Amino acid sequence: DADVTQTPRNRITKTGKRIMLECSQTKGHDRMYWYRQDPGLGLQLIYYSFDVKDINKGEISDGYSVSRQAQAKFSLSLESAIPNQTALYFCATSDPGTGTNEQFFGPGTRLTVL
Amino acid sequence: KNQVEQSPQSLIILEGKNCTLQCNYTVSPFSNLRWYKQDTGRGPVSLTIMTFSENTKSNGRYTATLDADTKQSSLHITASQLSDSASYICVVRGLDGTDKLIFGTGTRLQVFP
């Protein structure tokens, strides 16, 4: 987990506020992902990036945007937070060169929107 | 629709006992299947990975099995320890070239002394 860090770890905000969650990695991986996890549901893919110039929408991208500032940094923004975006958010990285393409997850950010 | 279903949703066992967690999937075509362990407040960590041609794989006290014909996998934990208390997530990777993973909802395991 230390190779993939997320900030903040916890955040409480109000409806309508703009929020940015940040992810940094020291693994040297090109691929980065943002997921959200809700109780009783599997992780759902929000956005993914195969390199700095490649950004792709996942299953549930509405209400979110991302920025890949560098190979090591991938941030997720909620332009106008709403209560149903309350969830646990995970960043992950992977290296397709390994063959198995294992994804390595950060420790998560718990976001509460009031 | 590609899906991954796990059972049971939750499980309580006593320390030292064995248990088996189940995963059924409908993902096709199929690349590999991983079991992840997620401790409370932490990100998931990979335990095992199995490809289409593998039937069983062990990682210490964890043994995963795969039946690609019936699209079923299991994770067997032997001689459970308190530190095994966590959620166990089955994750399937399809072969559509997008690198997307399909996550099960997990089994929440609690090991009591």
Image (cartoon, coloured by chain):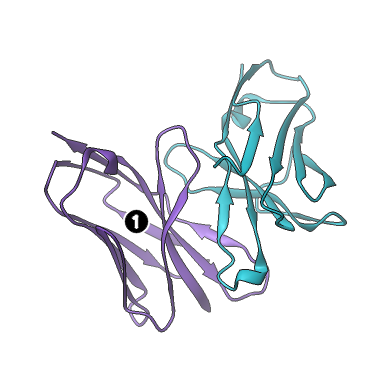
Residue found 66% across the figure and 71% down from its top: A97
Vertical arrangement, residue A79 with respect to residue A101, above or below: above
Q: Secondary structure at mark 1?
A: strand
> As rendered, which of A5 and A59 lies closer to the eye?
A5
Q: Residue at x 37, y 74 (%)?
A: B71
Q: Residues within 10 Å of mark 1 (few under 14, many from 20)?
A: many
Q: Quick check: B43 above or below B32?
A: above
- The one of B60 and B14 positioned closer to us in this rendering: B60
Is residue B27 visible in the rendered structure shown here? no
In the displayed structure, would residue B96 be above or below residue B48? below
Height in image: B35 above or below B67? Answer: above
Asked whether residue B11 appears in the rendered view, the answer is yes
Q: Which chain is purple?
A: B
Q: Quadrant of the N terminus of chain A?
A: top right
Q: Amino acid at mark 1?
A: Gln
Question: Residue B50 vs residue A70: left or right?
Answer: left
Instruction: Return the residue at label 1.
Output: B6
Residue A34: x, y in percent?
66, 46
Spot occupied by residue B15 in the image (x, y as percentages of width and height): 14, 41
Chain identifier for the cyan-coloured part of the image = A
- Residue A38 position, x and y percent, is 50, 38
- Residue at figure coordinates x 70%, y 52% from the top left: A32
> Residue A36, position in %: x, y?
58, 41
Mark 1 belongs to chain: B
Q: Residue at x 73, y 43 (%)?
A: A62
The quadrant holding residue A90 is top right
Name the quadrant of the C terminus of chain A: top right
Q: Nearer the viewer, residue A32 or A62?
A: A32
